[in-house]
Amino acid sequence: MAQRSDSSLGIRTVEWLRDNGARGIVNTVENWYYSLNAPAKGGPALRALPAQSGVLATGATVVHHHRVHHYRPPRIQPIIDPALPGEGMWHATFAAGGSRPPVLITSFRPDPAYPQVVAGVAWIDHTRTSVHLYPGLQEPAVSMSSRGPMEVPPALRGGLVATFNSGFKLADSGGGFAYHGHTYATMHDELATIVGYTSGQVDIVAWKGGPDVGPGVTFARQDLPLIVNHGHVNPNLSDGPEWGATLGNKIFVWRSGVGIDRHGNLIYAAA
């Protein structure tokens, strides 16, 4: 718990207990907490979406396909009718970019049964950005001769447009990990993998490359199996462990994920 961390003392304490023989106790307490703080099913609908930090005040980014020659994602079609103002419409962020912002964000309500639950989504233009992976101080929990800076280097933060966590702990997901072309945790076929190549390209795939990454891979980080693969939803999400531990699949817990569209742009979602 005394190691350098940007997490609160409470979070560090819980994680220490989980890793030192008290996983069952932690899971029981979490079950109580999430049960008491579960979102209400049904109930009054929202009148407006929560404000999203980082949004420019210029309003939504409107896509005119007959005038614009670079790709922009279409609006996320609202699932709940009537839609709230701005629901599913993309907005530019504070990141510089003029008429071609590198990041767009939006929000929408993903489940009619829970009309007060809101998901946030970010779209990251692969032609305007590059993706780097930085191992943390403790995760991935593998032995490395050098973990690098263990944070985004201060010299690069002036051009930073987004950061996100790389997934479950390796001990929980059973996935692999490679950094600077070296495999530190064995890769497993069919697991969802974000892969960075020496060409600069980044992809998200169901891994089929065997236990070690090839010479063309800069980094690879595995998680659970893909949730969506080529537009098809994984059929094993509601009654198995492939969604992650959700306390018996009966309690709503926070989840986030990263995907890629058919144009190679990253999509990050959290709800």
Image: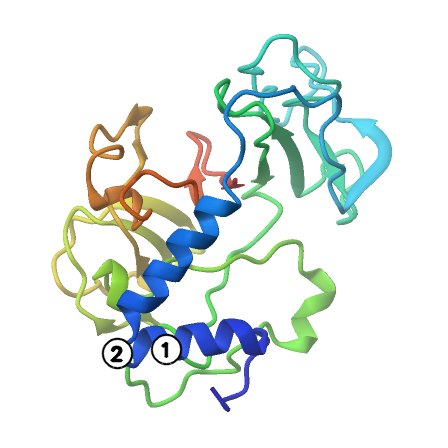
Q: Quadrant of residue 35?
A: top left
Q: Which colour scheme is used?
A: rainbow
Where residue 120 sits, quadrant-wise, is top right
Residue occupying the point 30% across, 48% down: 244
Classify 271 as above or below 131: above
Measured as percent of width and height from the top left, residue 64 is found at 70, 14
Q: Which of 62 and 216 is in front in this view?
A: 62
Amino acid at pointer 1: Leu
Q: Which residue is drawn at 22% across and 49% down?
A: 191
Q: Mark 2 points at which residue?
A: 21
Query: Is residue 41 left or right of 222 when viewed as pictured?
Result: right
Q: Which amino acid does label 2 sit on?
A: Gly
Q: In this view, does 109 lie above or below 249?
A: above
Does residue 141 show up? no
**Residue picked out by circle 1:** 17
**Spot occupied by residue 234 in the image (x, y as percentages of width and height):** 25, 31
Q: How far apart are marks 2 and 1 (CA)?
A: 7 Å
Where residue 171 appears, as percent x and y from the top left, is: 25, 68
Along the line of sight, the residue nearer the viewer: 98 or 88: 88
Name the element at disc 1.
helix
Graded by Cα atoms within 10 Å as few (under 14), some (14 to 19) or many (20 or more), the crowding at tag 1 reads some
Residue nearest the observer in this picture, 25 or 114: 25
Callouts 2 and 1 close, C-beta under 8 Å = yes
Q: How crowded is mark 2: few (under 14 residues within 10 Å), some or many (20 or more)?
A: few
* Dot 2: element: loop
Q: Is residue 127 left or right of residue 183?
A: right
Give the residue drawn at x 47%, y 83%: 148
